[in-house]
Structure formats: C-alpha cells, structure tokens
Amino acid sequence: MDEVVVDPSLLNGRDGATRWMNLGWWERTTRYPEAAAALARQVGRAAGLRTGDHVLDVGCGAGDSPALWVREFGVAGVTAVEPNPTLATTARDRIDRWGLGGRITVQTRTAESVTARDGIERMDAVVAVDVAYHIRTRARWLQRLGANTRPGTRFGSFDIALRHAEDRERVARQAHRAGIPTENLWTVEEIVPTLTAAGFTQVTIRHAEAEVFAGFVHFARRQAVRLAAHPRRGGWRALGTALLLATAAQRLSAVVIGAQRGEGSPSGHSDTFDISAT
C-alpha cells in the first residue's frame, strides 16, 4: 500500500485533537473531524463490530480509527497496521496517551504483509476505512485476506468504484494523481465477484455518493489556498482527490462494503444485498 502523504493537520486543523485522514461522511456536518469519524462508524457498522471483538484495522493512520472501535464499539482489542512510519509512531504515542495501549497495538507495516503467521485467523473482523483502493493490488490483498481468515470473520470497508468499465481509461490519469493505481479501478459490478472469489459471502453494498463526494469537494474548495500552499505536506494530493471527485463524480461510486468469510476455501457462491436505500 502506498504511504499516506497528506499531513493530517491540513485536514483536521492545528489543535491536534484529531488526526483523521479519510473523505468523510458529510450527511449531518460541515466539519471535517466529525465527517471523518462518521465515515469510520459506517465502516464499523458494515463489519458488524461488537463488544469483545478482536479487530484488524488496515491503514489506521494516526490512530483515530482504532480508538473509535474501542471507545464506541467496545471491541476487546485492535491490531492496527500503518505503513507510514511517522504516522505509526504518532498513532502509538497518541494511543498510549489515551491509556489504550493495553487494547491497541500499532505495527509499522503494509496491509499486504499481514499473513496467518500474524494471528489473523484469530480476528473476528477486518476493517479498512478509505484505504483499500491504495493497496497494490486490492484484488490480490482480498485473496490473501480470504485465505488467511477463518470462516465467520466479518469485513467492512469504504471504497471507490467505477460505475461503468468503459470509463476506466478516462478516469485513470486523475486517479493516479489521487494515489489510486489503475489496476484498482474496479467497477461496482466487479465488487461481488472479487469478494466471492476471495471466499467472502453475505456481501452488502451501500452507495454513498451524496454523503461522501460532495462534502469532501466542498471542504477542499474552502481549504484550497491552504492545501495548495503545502505541497510537501500532501496538500496537492488532497486537492488531486477533490479534483477527481469533482470532475469524475458521474463516473464514480462511493461504496460501504460489508461481508463475511464463508466456509471452505475461497471461491463459490455469494449472497448479495444492495442496501443503498437503508
């Protein structure tokens, strides 16, 4: 997975209270920290997180998401992985300061490197908040995830997908500027087969273009001068993402995905539910 390059303070503000790094769920707020936390909650619900769970958090950033799983969902423990060394160190420091070090472990590593040897088969759920489309490649990672998790393991993710396969070339250049590899530009129709091939069943897909895209674009426009002034801190990456969403919004879908690891080896039938209207 590519290292995250956007400085969280550019998104959250300078007070240091939060260090979120996702597109946000803007249904009931115009404030970035609230929107970012709301998107994480959607992923947690999609994964069915509950009291006592042991969770693998992929791409935890500066530690806000694993803390939210513990504080709001009551999970027993979180193994969080973050490939950016600076962010991982920040996450560990903040988690220790919050007194959550006994329940959250942060490892400096990529999502792709986690295997059965790391105890992933003991996890009750795997969550990925707005990071899966950066993983090289998402499809291979999902295959490894399915191969290394036990039946019944729940999965929750926020992701971006093309509405139509013929738009892949049109979107590819803009996607690259936002840190999305071309090979990760899957379509909505490819989500279920990809998860099914990886061994997941009971797939749910909730479309969330209205809740995610417009709000982040509006936020980035308000912060455009500040973001543009800090290219080395990732301001241009944030603006590139906003540009992608603004210019290609009619070709992209925002999706919250839930699934469960099925019985047997990866492959087979998947029951699918579109819960866009819920």
Image (cartoon, helix red, strand yellow):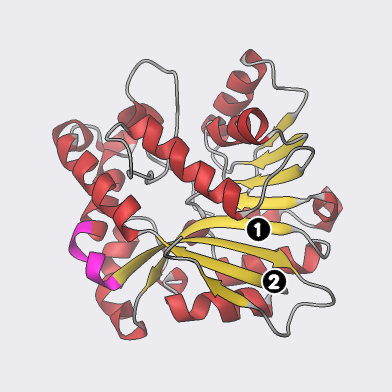
**Residue range (magenta):** 246-251
Taking the magenta stretch, the answer to whether it contains residue 249 is: yes
- Picture quarter containing residue 28? top left
Q: Is residue 132 visible?
A: yes
- Picture quarter containing residue 259? bottom right
**Which comes sooner in the sequence, label 1 or label 2?**
1
Return the x and y of residue 3 as percentages of the image width and height.
49, 46
Residue that lies at the very extreme toward the front in this rendered image:
278
- Where residue 155 is drawn, which disc sits there? 1
Q: Kindly identify the residue that appears in the image at 72 percent across and 51 percent down.
A: 125
Considering the numbered disc 1 on the image, is that residue within a helix, a strand or a loop?
strand
Give yes or no for contact between labels 1 and 2 (Cβ–Cβ under 8 Å): yes
259 to 68, vertically: above or below:
below
Horizontal side of residue 125 vs 44, given as left or right: right
In front: 91, or 42? 42
Horizontal side of residue 89 vs 182, given as left or right: right
38 to 16, vertically: above or below:
below
Return the x and y of residue 267 as percentages of the image width and height.
73, 82
Return the x and y of residue 228 as percentages of the image width and height.
18, 38
The type of residue carrying mark 1 is Phe
Return the x and y of residue 112 as percentages of the image width and height.
65, 58
Q: Is residue 7 visible?
A: no
Taking the magenta stretch, the answer to whether it contains residue 127 is: no
The type of residue carrying mark 2 is Phe
Name the residue beneath numbered marker 2: 200
Q: Kindly identify the residue that appears in the image at 63 percent across and 16 percent down.
A: 98
Q: CA distance from mark 1 to mark 2?
A: 9 Å
